[in-house]
Image (cartoon, rainbow, N blue to C red):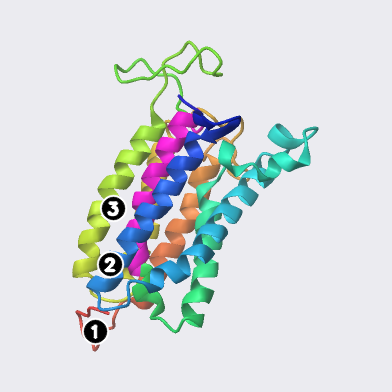
């Protein structure tokens, strides 16, 4: 756990913010590579990037503030709601708003929507792995107590001390890296536009639901399924349904060409 990476004079540079920024950069580079591989202008991704970055951060922060307003923000300076560099982002909020803004901008740029979405999906998985390492350094999104030999200990100032807890941040980071590799293979072998993006939605929903079983940072369970699913699992269920629906809508019919590249 190392929330502050270093100081520039009296200004602290937060490890979480640095890793999230590196994740965005890595994801964009991968997306540009995929665009070129599918015959599109890879530079277009950098015109799209500012919209995706801002939408992702705003969506993730708004979801977090809305979810934890009573716990983290009531009675504190209102400016803390904007302190994203200190952590406090909900991934699904960023994914949803980033997707909506991305659809709008891709249409405005007159690019093939689902092909671009396929190019972006592996980069999102890779960037998310960086973000989870940022969570580890920040001490958030931690696991529940465990006696397994790979349990980790946070410093005495952490709420879990002195117990060993599941390294849920590492679990999800490693799973995202493996998922990234699978999606990169999928971009090369996809059979229709939107296949890789819809598989990303389905695959990440399952991946996230799995790692949620080891999380220990939730005080309450989701309503209306209180005591059954965590908030992340409930949202994952909705994302899974959306991914399945998108896959079924976009897949080619029996009379269509089975293999395409763009």
Alpha-carbon span between mark 3 and mark 1: 29 Å
* Residue count near mark 3 (Cα–Cα under 10 Å), binned few <14, some 14–19, many ≥20: many
Q: Report x, y in % for residue 117.
A: 38, 69
Q: Does the magenta stretch include residue 159?
A: no
- For residue 254, the mark is 1
List x then y, in percent, for residue 216.
Answer: 50, 27
Element under disc 2: helix
Q: Judge depth for marks 2 and 1 and give the one in front.
A: 2
Labelled disc at residue 180 = 3
Neighbor class of circle 2 (other Cα within 10 Å; few <14, some 14-19, many 20+) is many
As helix, strand or loop, the secondary structure at mark 3 comes to: helix
Helix, strand or loop under label 1: loop
Q: What stretch is highlighted in magenta?
A: 118-141
How many numbered callouts?
3
The structure residue drawn at horizontal position 49% and vertical position 69%, both measured from the top left corner, is: 102
Task: Say which quadrant the C terminus sits in.
Answer: bottom left
Residue 99 image position (x, y, % from top left)? 50, 65
Q: Name the residue under label 2.
A: 34
Q: In which quarter of the image is the N terminus?
A: top left
Kindly identify the residue that appears in the image at 35 percent across and 33 percent down.
170
**Earlier residue among tags 2 and 1:** 2
Q: In this rendered view, identify the residue nearer to me: 72 or 57.
A: 57
Instruction: Answer whether labels 2 and 3 touch (C-beta < 8 Å).
Output: no
Instruction: Report how far apart the C-alphas of labels 2 and 3 lie in the structure.
Output: 12 Å
């Amino acid at each position: 756990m190392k929330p502050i990476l270093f100081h520039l004079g009296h200004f602290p540079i937060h490890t979480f913010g640095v890793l999230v920024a590196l994740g965005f950069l890595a994801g964009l580079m991968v997306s540009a590579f995929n665009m070129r591989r599918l015959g599109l202008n890879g530079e277009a991704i950098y015109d799209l990037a500012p919209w995706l970055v801002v939408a992702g951060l705003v969506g993730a922060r708004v979801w977090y503030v809305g979810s934890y307003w009573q716990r983290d923000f009531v009675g504190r300076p209102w400016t803390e709601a904007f302190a994203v560099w200190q952590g406090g982002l909900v991934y699904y909020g960023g994914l949803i708003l980033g997707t909506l803004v991305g659809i709008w901008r891709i249409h405005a740029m007159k690019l093939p929507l689902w092909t671009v979405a396929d190019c972006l999906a592996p980069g999102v998985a890779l960037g998310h792995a960086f973000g989870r390492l940022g969570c580890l350094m920040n001490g958030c999104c931690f696991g529940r107590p465990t006696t397994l030999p790979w349990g980790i200990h946070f410093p005495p100032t952490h709420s879990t001390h002195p117990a060993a807890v599941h390294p849920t941040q590492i679990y999800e980071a490693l799973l995202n890296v493996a998922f990234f590799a699978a999606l990169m293979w999928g971009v090369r072998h996809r059979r229709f536009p939107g296949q890789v993006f819809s598989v990303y939605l389905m695959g990440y929903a399952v991946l996230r639901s799995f790692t949620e079983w080891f999380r220990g940072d939730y005080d309450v369970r989701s309503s209306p399924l209180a005591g059954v699913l965590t908030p992340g699992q409930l949202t994952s269920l909705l994302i899974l349904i959306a991914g399945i629906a998108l896959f079924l809508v976009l897949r080619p019919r029996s009379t269509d060409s089975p293999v395409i590249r763009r």
